[in-house]
Amino acid sequence: MNDVIIVGAGPAGLSAGITCAKKGLGVLIIDEYMKPGGRLLGQLYEEPNGSWWNGIQESTSLYEHAVDLGIQFQLNTPVNNIEKLDQSWVIYTDKHTFNTDHLLLATGAAESPVPVPGWTLPGVMSVGAAQVMTNVHRVKPGERGVIIGVNVLSAAIAMELQLAGIDVACLTLPKLNKITKNAAQPKDVLESLLHVSHMAPSPLIRFGSKLMKNDFMKKMGVTFYPKEGVKMWDIPIQLRKAVINIYGDGEVEGITSATIDANGEVVSGSEENIACDFVCIAGGLYPLTELAAVAGCPFYLIDELGGYVPLHNERMETTLDGLYVAGNITGIEGAKVAIAQGVTAGLSIAENAGISGLDVDIQHSIQSIELTRDKAYIQFHPEVKKGKRILKEQWKEYERSVKKLVH
Amino acid sequence: MSRRILEHPVLGNLQDNKYISFTFNNKNYEGLESESIAAALLANGIRTLRYHEESGSPRGIYCNIGHCFECRVTVNGTQGVRACLTPLQAGMVIESGGKLPTPVRDWSAENE
Amino acid sequence: MTEEEMIVCRCEEVSYEELLQTATKYNCSPRELKLRTRAGMGYCGGRTCRGMVDTVASTIKAQERTQISLKYQPPIRPITFGDLGRQDK
């Protein structure tokens, strides 16, 4: 029996594990991926101070710290079920069954696609897939790609692809339909893009002439968005074009794009083909909550956090005894917030495991999550704080309803 | 192997250099030891990893981190192995799944 | 490929048109839409398409907030019958 088991070796899981191990608890971290780091592995961006946030380095230093503290790892190990038996949590994997009193779910996020005709062709992949292939595996997803879906994640990854010498033909919208909705509306996308404009200028400083023109912001403000798009890092961002088809015989050979009006409707006769050998689908992320769901956690759908989130308090405790959450399972945010949440979860676990005197540390760590959130360079959802308020209300609502049941 | 990103302005030069042999659909290839099977295949220019069981439509990697199961292949006789998160080892025999002889839907239409 | 033929559930190859028509014809909840079309019932367990199935169903009725609309069932990753048998011992 381990004191603590953590599912997910991403930033939240690793930081929680380190926090627990520092308090003397025996920790096991399980992850189905082959390397520790989770989504942090693929991340690479330049911070306002000019230094680079290198996900591989960050993952490696967290992992090495964890190993030094004696944390055990089970990588390449998918968890397929969890349940509570006789007051302790049982974690089922395909080879072993583990037990613990304190189980942290730090399972991160999954990508939600925007559907496009032809998107099952080999060569079409989620934008996160292209990121991992490029930065982690160091294999080009292709020579020339089109990214469908314009948002914070796809803009950041487009720059990463470019950095690795991969030609990104354009970032463009999916065609408007009953599933793509806002993601296909030029006005809505433009609005959301204004939140990433701060990311535009910095690569100019280091990589000079070829990348980026500083007129990005200016052009963003204009009412009539240019048909050929505005360039960011020399990549056209097209908000007045939509992809109506991905074509190819057996694998991707190109996309058919059409001009759209300000309401997202296709202008007939404007179709043109763009040759490419890979396509990225970028529909955003949603919290991956499946283990919390099979455990029986109550949920609430909070759009500002990316989807259904298991109810939890500021100490990262769920409504179920001995079950904790941290990282993107609690809402879509950056890795630094996930790391801060991991510290809080780790301290809560340590206190519940019988280590006293942690109250002040826990309060500080909760404040630290807030501070990290406020300083976040990449904000996946501009209204994330509103989302957290809704969550808090739902938690209180839940506590009230439980009290009523007890009395 | 021009598909590999050997040099990178921030991440530096690729350090791994231990190439090993494996087979995919009975053909020999080389890949880096312990990289994902999907990365090794893509570095060799292979995008199609399987064919849909019913329609036979070709499929490749989609999510690349184990969520979508589109990249499942048969490795050393074990079916349903995710190419995106299985480390490549020397001598691996990898095969792509194909269209099943009796489509499940046709069978259920006749038998239910 | 047309928009009607566009695949939404990649595992079970359920099209956009089939989902829309089924949702409209039967006034489907997400769960009913899934059961009628098999969208989200394939190999991946609906991880890829669940949001899209929810969205199609939300054209009929607003999505439920207090409960996950498309339930998760263990095992959440496919396991072989052999491994399943071993666990039950």
Image (cartoon, grey):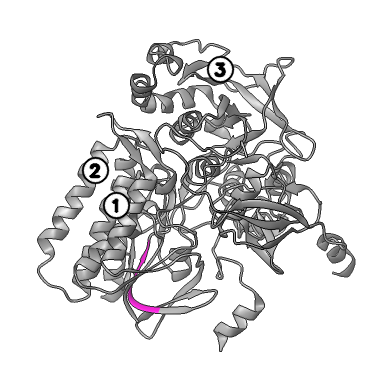
> For mark 1, what is the residue?
A339
- Quadrant in the picture for residue B8: top left
Which of the two labelled residues, at mark 3 and mark 1, occupies the earlier sequence position? 3
Q: Is residue A330 visible?
A: yes
Residue A204 within the magenta-colored segment of the rendering:
no
Q: Judging from the image, what secondary structure is the residue with disc 1 in? A: helix
**Residue A38 x %, y %:** 43, 53
How many numbered callouts? 3
**Which subunit holds the residue at mark 1?**
A
Q: Is residue A88 above or below residue B99?
A: below
The amino acid beneath tag 1 is: Ile
**Distance Cα–Cα, label 3 vs label 2:** 37 Å
- Quadrant in the picture for residue A195: top left
**Residue A301 x %, y %:** 43, 51
Q: Residues within 10 Å of mark 2 (few under 14, many from 20)?
A: some
Q: Judging from the image, what secondary structure is the residue with disc 3 in? A: loop
**Distance Cα–Cα, label 1 vs label 2:** 9 Å
Judge from the rendering whether residue A355 lies leftward or rightward of residue C30; answer left or right.
left
Instruction: Confirm whether circles 1 and 2 share one chain.
Output: yes
Quadrant of the image containing the C terminus of chain A: bottom left
> For mark 2, what is the residue?
A372
Q: Is residue A399 visible?
A: no
The amino acid beneath tag 2 is: Thr
